[in-house]
Image (cartoon, rainbow, N blue to C red):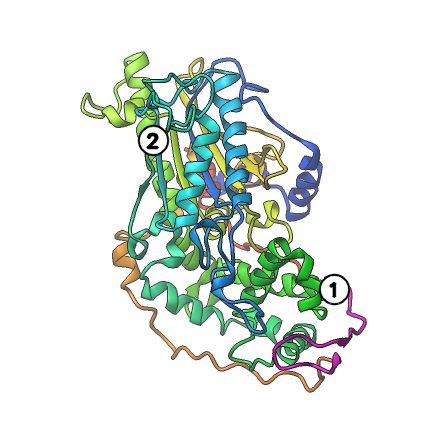
Amino acid sequence: MTRIAFLLLVTAATAFYLPTHEEKLAAWSKLNAVCDGDFKTGLPDGYELVLVNPIWRHGDRGPTESFAGDVLTEDDWDFGGGGYGELSPIGMQQHYELGEKLWTRYAENDKFLSARYRAKEVYARSTDKNRTLISAMSNFAGMYSRASAIKGTDYPDFAGWPQTFVPVPIHTEPQRTDYIGDATDTYCPRGDDLWELAKQHPEYVAYDSKPRTQQTLQYLRDQTGADEATVNFDNVYLIRGGMLCESIHFADNFSTWYPWYTEDVKQRVGEIDNQNIDFQNGIFGSGMFQGYDLTVEIPTVRGGPILNEVVEKAQGVLDCYVTNKYGVQTRCTEKDHFLSNLKYFVISGHDTSIAAYLTVLEAKPYVLTSGGYSSYSSAVITEFFVDTKNGNERYFRVLFHDDADSCFRIITPFVTGCEMGADFCKMDHLEALAAKYAPPGGIEDLCMQRVTGPAVSTTKPPPPATTSQLTTTNKPDNGPSTTVTVPTIPTTTTSASLFSFLSASTFVLIAKLIF
């Protein structure tokens, strides 16, 4: 590189300002009261919406399995067809109401989508789980099962059919190969290897070994009669998730069954689980470990497929839009009927789906500021635009739906490469992130490439000498203790660690500034 080129590179790099972690967190706190219910609000002149991609989590459900100390059995969970992990009527309502919000935003207010269901406009895929499939059905019922539906055309005209109910097809993929919907639940030996490696990372070991962590885990073992293999840093989510479900659906009995699971203990368990979740998503302060950058390797397996699917679909739809409407030559051909008509591409998934997507946007620490996973019926919505007044430049905007009681908040500024304070961001930045996290050779091949190097070991350091300092008395064999003493718990917490690497989109921008 010549001296002049080097000076230009330095100048460009310093001129392109990336907001600090503190600035991003401060900006997020200011968004708490922001609600964007009309997609044309703040839309620059000439911007035309072309594609909307919601990725949502299913609604409220029962626990996916039993947990240590559980007083219930699978037979006690009767809703949604019965058994573990099924969508509850609460979850169905949550998604019905989210569907209403989405219809209002994209169909009623602005006529981007047709008021009635149009098969060519909408494509929905779901993971192969009852709760995600029925969440999608409930969501589309909220969108299209309304007075605008035409009897005898959109739904049958006979007395037995639920009035105005319009069925919408939901496509799915076998769980073992659905790397897009939920890569965490697929067959991927490399992903398993990377997680075993992550559990040896100094940051993981340090957090697991903290007195606060071990004290909390030992307390849970004492109360449930479990051993370390049953209750530990890696699987404490089972207790957390099960307790959440039972506190919602068996509220009258919950405190009687589990008097030891106080709000203080609940907070500590959530704190530990949230940190573990961030480690699972490859969020470390320093990712390099034994020759692998876990901050890239893990997100590539978990979130690379979903981001690349979204970007690929968006590129195709955007190409066809400018070709069909403005005659601009692109990769779109006359045979691309699907992409020429597609406006609404849905992925119905899980908390892991949203976390993986936010992680590869490099926005998760700023959107889910406490770490961990998002709530039932949360959603990330990516909108894609064409600027028809400036050479058909392409832009995107990202919104987040926190939970059933929320509307939509713009989170575009937290995507790496996007300007702080800007609602819209050039498509180049999303494409750069997709390239950065694209699985080399495809996800199926990558998953079969095992992690090599030092032998993977899951041996943990011994817990600290301190005990849980929580005492119980008169604990029956089939229930919780009747007397619980809870100690004063330190108030310090560990915030989610952050990405420490410079993003690919930064280099793309610098290169454009120079050349």
Side of 143 where 204 appears, left or right? right
Up the image or down, 121 lies above or below 313; here it is above
Q: Disc number at residue 315?
A: 2
Q: Nearer the viewer, residue 160 or 315?
A: 160
Examine the image and state in which quarter residue 473 appears.
bottom right
Element marked by disc 2: helix
Q: Nearer the viewer, residue 105 or 308?
A: 105
Residue found 55% across the figure and 53% down from its top: 373
Q: Are marks 2 and 1 in contact (CB under 8 Å)?
A: no
Q: Secondary structure at mark 1?
A: helix
Secondary structure mostly seen in magenta is: loop
Residue shown at the point (66%, 58%) measured from the top left = 495
Q: Position of residue 99 (x, y in %)?
A: 49, 31
- The answer to which image quadrant residue 49 occupies is top left
Q: Nearer the viewer, mark 2 or mark 1?
A: 1
Mark 2 or mark 1: whose residue is earlier in sequence: 1
Which residues lie in the magenta part?
470-493
Name the residue carrying label 1. 264
In the rendered image, residue 198, in percent from the top left (x then y), is placed at 47, 68
Residue 375 in the magenta stretch? The answer is no
Q: Amino acid at mark 1?
A: Asp
Amino acid type, callout 2:
Gln
**How busy is the neighbourhood of tag 2: few (under 14 within 10 Å), some, or many (20 plus)?**
many
Q: What label sits on residue 224 in the rendered view? A: none
Extreme residue in the front direction: 159
Position of residue 144 relative to residue 458, above or below, is: above
Q: Position of residue 439 (x, y in %)?
A: 33, 52
